[in-house]
Image: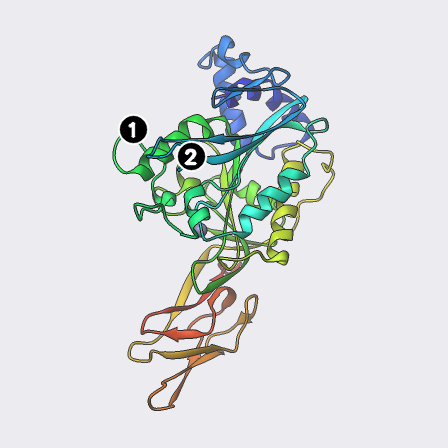
Amino acid sequence: MNKECWVSRVAILWAVVRGQRYSSRLAVVLCLAVSGIISPATASSADQSESLQLLGREISPGTISKFPFIPDRSFEASYLNMPVFVARGVTPGPTLCLTAGIHGDELNGVEIVRRAFAKVDPQELRGTVIALPTINAEGVRSGSRYLSDRRDLNRAFPGGTGGSVARLIAHAIFTRVLNHCDALLDFHTASNQRANLPQIRADFTDPAIRDLAVHFGLGIVVNGAGPDGSLRRESAKAGIPAIIYEAGEPFRFQELEIDRGVLGIENVMAYLDMTEMADQETPSARIYEHSKWIRTDRGHGGFFFPTASLGDMVNTGDLLGEIVDPLTDASVEVTSTLAGEIIGMAVPQPVLSGYALFHLAWHDPD
Ligand SMILES: [Zn+2]
């Protein structure tokens, strides 16, 4: 990976200028470099002022590049291709990676990454931004959450050289693109027929990930490592701090959710000292260690009508909505079984027993 190369030089600067932030992984790598475990030849092989070699291309300092990446050949050459955007700064710094559309129906992140990347000026940038705005391009094109083999690309990482096409694609992305990343931001929305309050999800057991999450500046961070095979979990296991941004509904662009995502990317770039917005205070965040779905009671499926909204703080016993039995016209109240903030919820629709209605998050008492 290129990360070892710049870290040995930049970590010292960061340690002085930026205190202990983002320091745990850097410190380990720095120690390895100093002790010779990472060889001097490796540590000096990727001078930021030099061109970046990525996917068989040479990306010069101070330039923007956009080109297709075909992770695997299919019956037509273009079938699986995805766009890659690269901004190579003129000044040394980390490589921030942005991914969206891993679930092809989740579109807010696609537009977030497009807008954020369009604002990057490589002449002012310290480091490199690599963006995969439609990492599951096939799904985005067809409006599908999944790949054509019905696999979830976000359960296939880090992939492999055999097995399903999802594993093959994941492996190509992981070994040829993500191996360049020093931090990763992955963008999602709620799944079909649900909406999410803008939130960050991150594994608090890793201090570097926790710092990344807090400095996104959104105000709500939910703890969790993510499922096995998910991009962020496997990236973190590979030593790349990774978080996801969850906001809004699938199948549409939503301005508020997009604006907050673009601002978050700018906040992270400032935190990583990639831009001049470096004097920001650490934003305060509501950090939730726990979350749980409140579901339709068994035997009480029907037509769901919420009365509570995203962002509401609720207590045990509070009314959240009602479910009407369309045959008897009887109505059943949906009440909260715990106290917390509503960070996700179903939209009004027919629901069956057990359907996930409200996603509540809460933190441990102080
Ligand atoms: Zn998703």
Q: Residues within 10 Å of mark 1 (few under 14, many from 20)?
A: few
- The nearer-to-camera label among 2 and 1 is 2
- Marker disc for residue 63: none
- Marker disc for residue 161: 1
At horizontal 58% and vertical 43% (from top left) the residue drawn is 113
Callout 1 secondary element: loop
Q: Is residue 33 visible?
A: yes
Q: Is residue 136 visible?
A: no
Mark 2 and mark 1 lie on one chain; the one further toward the N terminus is: 2
In the depicted view, which residue is nearer to us: 20 or 317? 317
Image position of 295 (left or right of 342): left
Q: Is residue 192 above or below residue 315?
A: above
In the depicted view, which residue is nearer to us: 352 or 342? 352
Q: Residues within 10 Å of mark 2 (few under 14, many from 20)?
A: some
Image position of 312 (left or right of 78): right
In the image, farthest residue toward the top: 41
Tell me the quarter of the picture where residue 212 sits. top right
In the image, farthest residue toward the front: 76
The kind of residue tagged 1 is: Thr
The kind of residue tagged 2 is: Ser
Label 2 to label 1, Cα distance in Å?
A: 21 Å
Q: Is residue 60 above or below residue 95?
A: above
Q: Where does the image place residue 85, in percent across and percent down from the top left? A: 56, 33
Q: Where does the image place residue 203, in percent across and percent down from the top left? A: 46, 45
Callout 2 secondary element: loop
At horizontal 39% and vertical 30% (from top left) the residue drawn is 172
Q: Where does the image place residue 167, in percent across and percent down from the top left? A: 32, 36
Q: Residue beneath label 2, please?
A: 78
In the image, farthest residue toward the left: 163
At horizontal 56% and vertical 22% (from top left) the residue drawn is 7
- Would you say the beta carbon of the disc 1 residue lies within 8 angstroms of ligand 1? no
Q: Where does the image place residue 27, in percent across and percent down from the top left? A: 53, 25
